[in-house]
Image (tube, coloured by chain):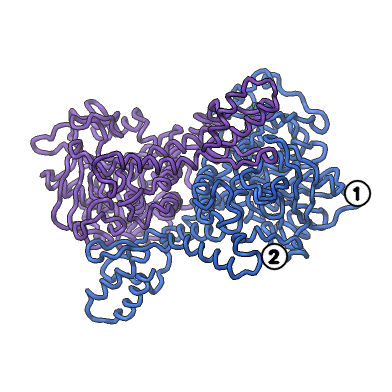
Chain colours: A blue, B purple
Amino acid sequence: MNVGKVGAKTLRALSKAPARTHVSLSARAASQCASPGSSSSSHERPHFPCVDAHAARESRIISSRSVSSTPPVSSGPEPPYARPNPKSYKVYRHTSPLPLVYADSLPSFDIAYETWGTLAPNKDNVILLHTGLSASSHAASTELNPAYGWWEKFIGPGKALDTNQFFIICTNVLGGCYGSTGPSSIDPSTGEPYATRFPILSIFDMVQAQFRLLDHLGIERLYASVGSSMGAMQSLAAGWLYPERVGKVVSISGTARSSPSAIAMRFAQRAVLMADPNWKNGFYYDGLPPHAGMKLARQIATITYRSGPEWDIRFGRKLRKLPDSEQQRPDKPRTPALCPDFLIETYLDHQGEEFCLKYDANSLIYISKAMDLFDMTAPTLSELRLTPPAPRSGPPPLPPSLSAHPSSPAHSQYHHLLSHSKSHPPPPNPPLHLPDLAAGLQPLANTPTLILGVQSDILFPVEQQREVADALRVAGNQMVSYYELGGVWGHDTFLLDVQNVGGAIRGFLS
Amino acid sequence: MNVGKVGAKTLRALSKAPARTHVSLSARAASQCASPGSSSSSHERPHFPCVDAHAARESRIISSRSVSSTPPVSSGPEPPYARPNPKSYKVYRHTSPLPLVYADSLPSFDIAYETWGTLAPNKDNVILLHTGLSASSHAASTELNPAYGWWEKFIGPGKALDTNQFFIICTNVLGGCYGSTGPSSIDPSTGEPYATRFPILSIFDMVQAQFRLLDHLGIERLYASVGSSMGAMQSLAAGWLYPERVGKVVSISGTARSSPSAIAMRFAQRAVLMADPNWKNGFYYDGLPPHAGMKLARQIATITYRSGPEWDIRFGRKLRKLPDSEQQRPDKPRTPALCPDFLIETYLDHQGEEFCLKYDANSLIYISKAMDLFDMTAPTLSELRLTPPAPRSGPPPLPPSLSAHPSSPAHSQYHHLLSHSKSHPPPPNPPLHLPDLAAGLQPLANTPTLILGVQSDILFPVEQQREVADALRVAGNQMVSYYELGGVWGHDTFLLDVQNVGGAIRGFLS
């Protein structure tokens, strides 16, 4: 880095010099900070601020650790999630074992939660709000924590989740790192963090933990279960596990069966994270966290959260503004850098940098895996020994052909029930998984359900939204509300489009 | 890894034991090889074969280096690309400087190339075939190299590129690592590999190097320039730089303006590569190559090469077959692993593993950056001081409104010229870049051009194919052939669909 600084100083000193060749050489030395581009005239090795950033971050973590009085240096750095503030949320501690789908059980667990609005005397106005992968229970500001929440504009008096009417509960998910038990929590049997000794979780386990909280609060029945993205998976799972306890289900930009392409994108994130030498098979809690891997993973994730059309409008092919230290030669086009140079690159870099110390790497691995594992088709539910409860008031009988041939293409048989029969052309091939999904979703046959998707979503594409709505209808559900939104915000639409997402929810809940 | 081996042996010894609890505990210890899932009953730390693979690969590289007599240990490992076999291809050595778009020049360069068919006496039957990012000049088997080539089924007597009729030349691209000069080549001014002292390349530079080869071969005019993916960019650039020397242009699954979302996907690949500690700012040629970063980068790339629908048909949510050493508990569903477990994950893992030592990391970085930089809109070409040559036989005049308002939406003005006016609905918004692109492509106004795209391509989406075809038509080109293919193969269709891709090319060239 000294080379770059010297180069920049030299450049400033020479920048008014008349001898153009001198300026040009110096300018090139300076621009090497980020831009290899000179071959023969300079033999200095270029350096790369985007790579140096990982080492610089590591130094910051170490130095912030050593100036802090507690914890001592030997206990390792403390990212924000390792400093939970129990005054900003409530915690329910469950002291008996929680049976799990894949592993035996968790011996005990904590669930962090926050609430908004007032619980009705008969407790019939409760909405359970489920989060996406990395969110905390802080969906909106509270008296305990006035900071802006991740769904701030959707929760409040007169808003989509109307606090004049409803009592809203949001939890940090089991497996998370914002106050609920997860891989970073202490394993009572060892006195050390679970790390990758933590059991594999399923979305159903997360929902079971939430219902233990509801039991504790004496809430027998939810007015509605609401969630987006992974929260939509939980929302569907809640209605499936407890048809009698869930009044309505809202699923926004979710799925009932994770697709191979979504698994691929999450696999890529886990792979870069687990390849970070700091990950140490998950046992990094007494050392440096895998911050570089987390940054890279978040960059990949961010690509899946928005859409190409949005980026084309927002960033196009625009380049970052050059600092003075990276002056360019006047006789050549601007030298491109291998480090982030296009605005789309600096955007992804920034998103990764912002996130990499905010969230626990093992939580990301476990929760993203739970999303991959989510599959509500009947054969998978059966393999998981998840016995479907009866729908609330007796299911309508399955069409005989469906039960007889659960894997046969449903295209021709159920065409009149399918979403695309109304406003969308039918897909080129019959929906592969519809019969199995319809059989799996049978317990939701009598639960009013809102399915909302976004046409520009590449992570939970609109075909999957149609699939869930269609499967519910084929299962006999006559109370399916189905909306598709346009726009360019992609998967993140659920965080941004207060008018359309909020409006659909408000209408469905009222 | 010893733990896992012992666990597996113990398991086999105990697998017929009647005491089920013993088996179950041992089975769990063994399954920890890949699957964390037991919390309280085992305090052994799980390990991860997918992470161990990076260290094992490193050991293999080191040991293969030390048993080899040449090169000596001190010269570092030698991946295949570092052992070019000059007998399997021809090399043209250009000994004078090549001016570059962004940097000054390359002092000299090599271009590796192969040929098929027979050059006509008047040299009028030449097809220049351009490669995608990572391909060598070995597009099809030759006498020098009988190995199967990357476009084997498209080149030969009676095939898409008919060797009975044409003389086909394919080069390894400038910047590559299969015999042409790139970052792994020796910088004559230092005697060391260029590494990241190599100048930033543009697609236009690559084409200029190819035309120096044509000059050397005495080939004044190409019958056609043909390419797919990055090769399509080169193909368009060739027709643009040399309208008088290029008879026809074929662009398959390419673009004339890299989009922010394609840049984002390539940025993610470069970022994981550059974060590999072995990358060392590009100066890794005397040590271990960044093989782990290359594997991760290739995994991400592979996601963009195929399509979700293909994976849904091919892999679905199927899991890998478990080896005997990972027996599962009979009373529980199969324990999921955090390492690759779904077939889609093992597929990506395998693709990454296969590639990571086959290609030079710096070549990947430089060439993927050249793709990002590719933009044939008039304002960018002007910034790059690329002066448009005149089209072959005088261009038709631009519509006056286009020259007067180069950035105005062309939607209403040119609707009758647009691809979607025939078989596709118009996009919701007017095409943003059409006027600038039409102005930029003006030199191609009189060159017969085939644009072919694939509807399931997520890297070079079909909208970009329509955009190129539309821009050429708006520029006055009345010889644009335009095809869209269906199917589920995504971007890789150009490698797979001999019947449709090959057929379109054959028809266009004849």
Q: Residue at x 18, y 40 (%)?
A: B86
Q: Residue furthest right?
A: A121
Within 10 angstroms of label 1, few (less than 14), some, or many (20 or more) residues?
few
Q: Is residue B382 left or right of residue B312?
A: left
Q: Is residue A280 left or right of residue A374?
A: left
- N-terminal label among 1 and 2: 1
Residue A386: x and y in percent read 72, 30
Q: Chain of mark 2?
A: A
> SS class of the residue under badge 1?
loop
Q: Residue at x 44, y 43 (%)?
A: B54
Q: Is residue A192 left or right of residue A509?
A: left
Q: Nearer the viewer, residue B304 or B389?
A: B304
Q: Nearer the viewer, residue A67 or A144?
A: A67
Q: Nearer the viewer, residue A320 or A287?
A: A287
> SS class of the residue under badge 2?
loop
- What residue sits right under mark 2 in the picture? A147
Q: Residue at x 71, y 54 (%)?
A: A179
